[in-house]
C-alpha cells in the first residue's frame, strides 16, 4: 500500500513540477522577469516546507557542525543556480529543449563519479553517456553549439548545477529532508531577496493580479512536491523514483505544445528520445555515488 502511495505521490510531484515549468515559461512570455518569478515562488516554497514540517511534528534540527552547515549551504547554492539558469534559458529557447537538456544531469553525475571516485566505466555506462551527448547534439544542432546559443548554454549549466545538487543531497542523507530543505530554501530566499531589489524586476505590487497569485500558489505546491518526492524515496528505490519523476518532462512538453504552440522539429524530437534513453540507462546503473562522502570528507554524526 505504501509502495503505491509513493508512486502516486511521485506522479503528483511530477505534475506539479511540469506545471510550474510551463507556468514559468508562460509568465516570462507575459513579460515577468525570471528572477522575480524565482524569488516570489521560492519564498512561498520555503513557507510551504516549514508549514509541512510543523504539521508533521518534525523537529527542526539545529546544525552546529561548521563543515556540515557549509555542505547544506552549498546544496542550497546548487539548488538556487539550477532553477535560475533553467528559467534564464526559457528566455532564449523552448520549454521542451530546456527540460531535456537540463535532464542530462544524471550523465554528469556519472562523469563526476568516474573522475573523482574511480567508478568503473562499463560498456553500458559509456553507451548511456554517448546517447546523452548525441541527444544534446540533435537538440541544440551544431550551429547553436558553436555559436554558444544562450538557450543551450543556460540549460546545460542548469544540468551541471542539478548534478551538484544531487551529489550534495546525497552527502546530507543522514539529516532529515525537512531540516536540509528549510536551511537550503531559507538560504535561497535570503540571497534572492538581497539581489532582487538591484535587478529592477519587481512589478507594481499595487496591481496584484492573478499572475502573482498563481506564482505564489506554484511556490506553495513546489514545497508539497518536494515532500512527496522525499517521502517516495523512503519507500521505493532511488532509481525507480528518478524514472517516475521523468513524468515532469512529458507533462511540461505537452502543456507547452497545447498552450504555447511549441512544436519540436523532427531532429529535436529525435534528440529528446535519445537523451531519454541515455538517462534511463544511466539511472538504472549500480552507482558508487554514495561514496562522495568519503571524497568530500564529510563526517556524519547522526
Image (tube, helix red, strand yellow):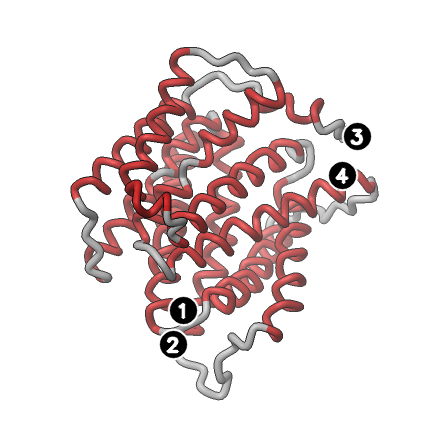
Q: Earlier in the sequence, mark 2 or mark 3?
A: 2
**Distance of label 2 from label 4 (alpha carbons):** 40 Å
Question: Nearest the camera: 198 or 13?
Answer: 198
Task: Please tell me which of labels 4 and 3 falls first in the chain.
Answer: 4
Please say if 186 is above or below 143.
below
Label 2, residues with CA under 10 Å away: few <14, some 14-19, many ≥20: few
- Left/right of residue 165 with respect to residue 255 in the rendered view: right
Picture disc at residue 68: 4
Residue at disc 2, secondary structure: helix
Q: Which residue is located at x 52 percent, y 77 percent? A: 202
The residue that mark 2 highlights is: 210
Residue picked out by circle 1: 214
As drawn, the residue found furthest toward the bottom would be 206
Q: Which mark is residue 301?
A: 3
Tell me the SS state at disc 3. Answer: loop
1 or 4: tag closer to the N-terminus = 4
SS label for mark 4: helix
* 122 lies above or below 284: above
Q: Are marks 2 and 4 in contact (CB under 8 Å)?
A: no
How many neighbours does mark 4 have within 10 angstroms: few (below 14), some (14-19), or many (20 or more)? some
Amino acid at each position: 500500500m505504501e509502495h503505491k502511495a509513493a508512486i502516486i505521490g511521485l506522479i503528483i510531484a511530477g505534475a506539479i513540477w511540469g506545471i510550474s515549468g510551463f507556468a514559468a515559461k508562460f509568465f516570462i512570455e507575459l513579460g515577468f522577469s525570471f528572477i522575480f518569478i524565482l524569488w516570489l515562488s521560492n519564498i512561498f516554497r520555503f513557507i510551504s516546507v516549514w508549514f509541512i514540517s510543523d504539521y508533521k511534528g518534525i523537529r527542526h534540527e539545529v546544525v552546529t557542525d561548521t563543515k556540515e552547515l557549509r555542505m547544506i549551504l552549498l546544496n542550497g547554492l546548487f539548488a538556487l543556480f539550477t532553477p535560475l539558469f533553467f528559467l534564464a534559458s526559457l528566455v532564449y529557447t523552448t520549454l521542451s529543449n530546456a527540460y531535456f537538456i537540463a535532464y542530462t544531469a544524471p550523465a554528469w553525475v556519472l562523469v563526476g563519479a568516474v573522475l573523482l571516485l574511480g567508478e568503473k566505466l562499463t560498456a553500458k555506462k559509456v553507451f548511456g553517456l554517448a546517447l546523452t551527448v548525441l541527444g544534446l547534439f540533435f537538440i541544440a544542432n551544431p550551429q547553436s553549439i558553436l555559436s554558444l546559443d544562450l538557450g543551450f548554454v543556460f540549460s546545460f549549466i542548469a544540468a551541471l548545477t542539478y548534478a551538484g545538487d544531487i551529489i550534495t543531497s546525497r552527502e546530507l542523507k543522514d539529516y532529515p529532508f525537512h531540516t536540509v530543505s528549510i536551511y537550503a530554501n531559507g538560504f535561497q530566499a535570503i540571497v534572492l531577496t538581497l539581489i532582487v531589489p538591484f535587478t529592477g524586476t519587481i512589478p507594481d505590487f499595487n496591481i496584484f493580479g492573478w499572475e502573482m497569485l498563481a506564482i505564489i500558489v506554484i511556490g506553495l505546491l513546489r514545497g508539497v512536491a518536494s515532500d512527496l518526492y522525499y517521502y517516495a524515496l523512503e519507500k521505493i528505490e532511488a532509481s525507480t523514483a528518478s524514472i517516475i519523476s521523468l513524468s515532469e518532462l512529458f507533462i511540461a512538453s505537452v502543456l507547452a505544445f497545447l498552450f504555447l504552440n511549441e512544436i519540436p522539429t523532427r531532429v529535436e524530437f529525435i534528440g529528446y528520445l535519445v537523451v531519454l534513453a541515455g538517462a534511463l540507462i544511466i539511472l538504472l546503473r549500480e552507482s558508487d555515488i554514495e561514496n562522495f562522502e568519503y571524497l568530500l570528507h564529510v563526517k556524519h554524526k547522526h
